[in-house]
Image (cartoon, helix red, strand yellow):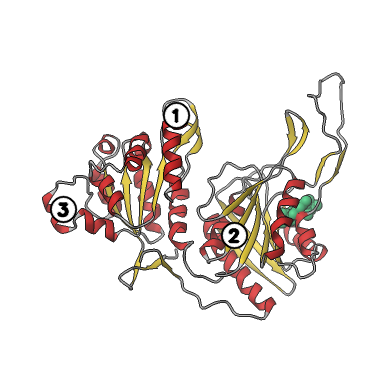
Amino acid sequence: METFWIRSGRDKLSPMNIVLGITGGIAAYKAPDLVRRLRERGGEVQIVMTASAEEFVTGTALQAVSGRPIRSNLWDKEAEAAMSHIELARWADVVLIAPATAEVMARIVSGGAPDLLTTICLATEAPLAVAPAMNHIMWSNPATQANRKVLEERGIHILGPGIGSQACGETGAGRMLEPDTIAAAVFDLAVGKGEGLLTGRKVVITAGPTREPIDPVRYITNRSSGKMGYAMARAAAAQGAEVVLISGPVNLPEPPGIEVRNVLSAQDMYEATHTCVGEADIFIAAAAVADYRPAEWREQKIKKNEESMSIDLVRCPDVLASVAALAAGPFTVGFAAETEKVDDYARSKLENKSLNMIIANRVGSDCGFDTDDNSVNVIWTDGEQRFPEARKSELARDLVELIARHFYAARGTDPQPRLTVISNIE
Ligand code: CTP
């Protein structure tokens, strides 16, 4: 696994230092997994627990996975002598609070600092990210929403929450995002600010499914989750690109630092793409765009009066082919989602749509759609490269590097000098 290195204010290369604040919510039981994910990516993790977090997860477990003594008490003389709260605040390249309760969000908004964690939040200049986790009614409470808004306005990154079943037995928005999703977002916070292969380049990416309405209550869609397209967007931003992500309806958090334009139908996606693709250097079509839509939209709900019925379908615009056909258009990359003859069909799409590259993947009930892993074969006119099964976030990093290299080769130019290194403080 690649380790991320950052150039710190001390002007030396060091792994990313993460202060992980854990507050008192049931999702704290996921904290050991989160620590593991952050460390897998090369982060140094210093845990700071609040008193109520200790009701949900033990310091012993967290100390074992983080490899560092847990900090929890602002008045612990011994710990403060080793590294004071001000030194901790300076040490951090990122401060992450996961899970973040409604209480800690309110505290940060008010600027109160009754404990070690909130004191660090006040004293740090590092980016601050919070992953809220609470009952859905608490999350939708106007007070919490007002606090969320203030935090966002102050540039604090809100990761999630996700929607789904909750520990309290209810369902709604308030679940903490999965540890791997949080870890990826935290590294993007620092990485996205860095210089990379695509610094100064604009990348437009489509992602997710489209919805083609039949009547006011029904539509045609597909199983795409948008995860691959979102991972590509994060990876391109991590390489320094200015990214516009044109997204169909998905259940994913907006990646920090990326302009997201939400659309519903294939026609919407076509129009949104053509408003911004003119200035793009690279276009990546990761969306599963509907090929057909109902010929007419019924204004009233269709009633089941007949034994059988049929719906006339007409072709949707092909977003990717239309971009590839632009004179002086961007370097275009498509995806080919196939259930059989994957490489053959992908090759014919590469030719028929006049693409620079195509990323072929097998999809089916067991793979490709709505999973966290993927394996692909990238094909271009005179070559191909296989990528074995990997997490979509890691795969996206490798794919974006390959695309960038081919982009510069096609343009006959070199990338800006590359720093694998991220500068996020001073
Ligand atoms: N695509 C697009 N607009 C469409 C259909 C597809 O932009 N209306 C893009 C997809 O985003 C993908 C590529 O074209 O990058 C191939 O999509 P895919 O669904 O695999 O193939 P189709 O071209 O739709 O052909 P078929 O359904 O016959 O396999």
Residue 31: x %, y % from top left: 35, 44
Instruction: Kindly report the distance in space between the C-alpha atoms of the residues bearing marks 3 and 1.
Output: 38 Å
Residue type at the position of mark 3: Ala
Q: Which residue is mark 3?
A: 79
Label 1 close to label 2 by CB (< 8 Å): no
Question: Which label belongs to residue 141?
Answer: 1
Tag count in the figure? 3
Residue 418 is situated, as x and y percent measured from the top left of the image, at 50, 75
Amino acid on which the number 1 mark rests in the picture: Asn
Q: Secondary structure at mark 2?
A: strand
What residue sits right under mark 2 in the picture?
Answer: 243
Mark 3 or mark 2: whose residue is earlier in sequence: 3
User: Is 158 left, or right, of 377 in this rendering?
Assistant: left
Residue found at x 74% / y 56%: 274
Q: Judging from the image, what secondary structure is the residue with disc 1 in?
A: loop
Q: Earlier in the sequence, mark 1 or mark 2?
A: 1
Q: Residue at x 37, y 35 (%)?
A: 102
- Of the two numbered discs 3 and 1 on the same chain, state the one appearing first in sequence: 3
Q: Nearer the viewer, residue 379 or 120?
A: 120
In the image, what residue type sits under mark 2?
Answer: Val
- Image point (22%, 49%), residue name: 71
- The location of residue 387, given as percent across then percent down, is 59, 64
